[in-house]
Image: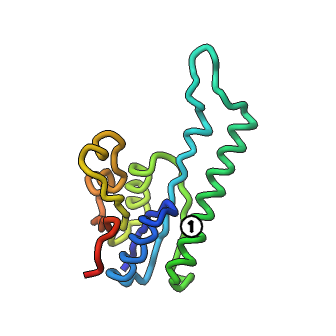
Amino acid sequence: MHALIATDGSPVSLEAARKGCAILNPDKVTLVTVADTSIAEDSGAGGFEGNLLSVEESRDVRGVIIETGQEELSDTVKALGLDPTIVETKLLEGSPGPVICAAAEEFNPDVVVVGSHGRGWFQRLVIGSISEYVARHCLSPVLIVRAGDNDG
């Protein structure tokens, strides 16, 4: 079984990755993290003022975001304790929900595993939910592991 596991380095996503691996026992894992580098591209000032960040500062911020994403992947691989020969890591850039769905189309896993913070309906309405987006838009089956779910 091939599992695409999305992680952001948080305890919730690490817990989801662990539980997903325990439930599915995959023989291939594509571990994906999505670096949202949009803050480095546009600082939000816009208009006549221009961006708040210089080109050099934007490049530096993007570099930090990418480096953090690489560390998240590396830390997750170590924490899962999987055979490294079955794990492929991918650092992707963009908006997490759509990028995870596009990765699922590209890598064609048997299942996509994502964590959920377990926020209520109002928080999902206001700030959105990556796991909800993936569940609604991904063409592959999706396993959502909620924070604090019991093992059985």
- Quadrant housing residue 117: bottom left
Element marked by disc 1: helix
- Quadrant housing residue 89: bottom right
Residue 132 appears at what percent x and percent y? 29, 53
Q: Which residue is disc 1 drawn over?
A: 73
Write the residue at 58% across / 24% down.
Answer: 45
Write the residue at 65% across / 27% down.
Answer: 52
Residue 61 appears at what percent x and percent y? 67, 44
> Is 151 left, or right, of 66 in this rendering?
left
Q: Which kind of residue does numbered mark 1 sit on?
A: Leu
> Is 47 left, or right, of 136 in this rendering?
right
User: Could you tell me how many numbered marks the image carries?
Assistant: 1
The image shows residue 78, relative to residue 10, as above or below, that is below
Residue placed most toward the observer, 75 or 55: 75
Residue 72 appears at what percent x and percent y? 57, 64
The local crowd at label 1, few if under 14, some if 14 to 19, many if 20 or more residues have their Cα within 10 Å, is: many
- Quarter of the figure that contains the N terminus: bottom left
- Quarter of the figure that contains the C terminus: bottom left
